[in-house]
Image: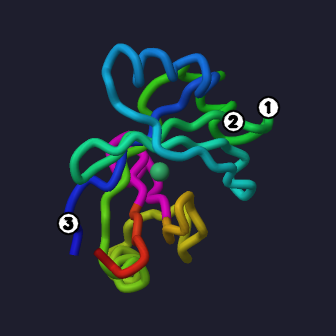
Amino acid sequence: MISRIDHIGIAVNSIEAVRKLYEDVLGIKISETEIVEEQKVKVAFLPIGDSEIELLESTDPDGPIARFIASRGEGIQHIALRVSDIDTKLEELKARGVRLIDEVPRKGAGGARIAFLHPKATYGTLIELCERGGGK
Ligand code: ZN
């Protein structure tokens, strides 16, 4: 049911500022940028094989990414696992008593349906479940 690492989310102060590192130095093309209003972030994807890096820049000083950077600095913010059926997976986790941030999926970048597990339930790592269209 969990098929791969969908993406790794990295919090940055400015996507523009890190573009040179990822594109020119590392040679990974930034494929698209979009605003996810609900999470108060601007997001850019960098495809690498079957997975992606997701750069997250806050659009609001009180948004979750701004708060993350304020307390922990720039860096890896979450790991997203690809699931084929997020509703069933969430039901399964709830039944097992796993603490969740999102009990129902919300809309993520790229039209994905996502839900976060609570880091207290995952030994400190923020884990996102991510279902893509077509259930790949
Ligand atoms: Zn993500």
* Image side of residue 47 versus residue 31, left or right: left
Sequence-wise, the earlier of marks 3 and 1 is 3
Q: Quadrant of residue 38?
A: bottom right
Tell me which residue sits at (49%, 68%) in the image.
112
Q: Secondary structure at mark 3?
A: strand
Mark 1 is on which residue type?
Pro
How far apart are the two marked residues, 3 and 2, measured between alpha carbons?
29 Å
Task: Verify CB contact (< 8 Å) between mark 1 and mark 2.
Answer: yes
Q: Kindly identify which numbered label has been placed on residue 17.
A: none
* Image side of residue 44 versus residue 132, left or right: right
- The response on whether ligand 1 sits within 8 Å of label 1 is no
| Residue annotated with mark 3 | 3
Q: Is residue 88 magenta?
A: no
| Residue annotated with mark 2 | 58
Q: How is the image coloured?
A: rainbow
Picture layout, residue 21 above or below residue 15: above
Q: Quadrant of residue 124?
A: top left
Mark 2 is on which residue type?
Ser
In front here: 26 or 117? 26
Residue 46 screen position, x and y as percent: 40, 40
Tell me which residue sits at (47%, 54%) in the image.
118
Sequence-wise, the earlier of marks 3 and 2 is 3
Mark 3 is on which residue type?
Ser
Magenta-drawn segment: 115-128
Residue 79 screen position, x and y as percent: 36, 46
Residue 131 screen position, x and y as percent: 40, 71
Q: Secondary structure at mark 2?
A: strand
| Residue annotated with mark 1 | 61
Task: Verify CB contact (< 8 Å) between mark 3 and mark 1.
Answer: no
* Image side of residue 14 versus residue 129, left or right: right
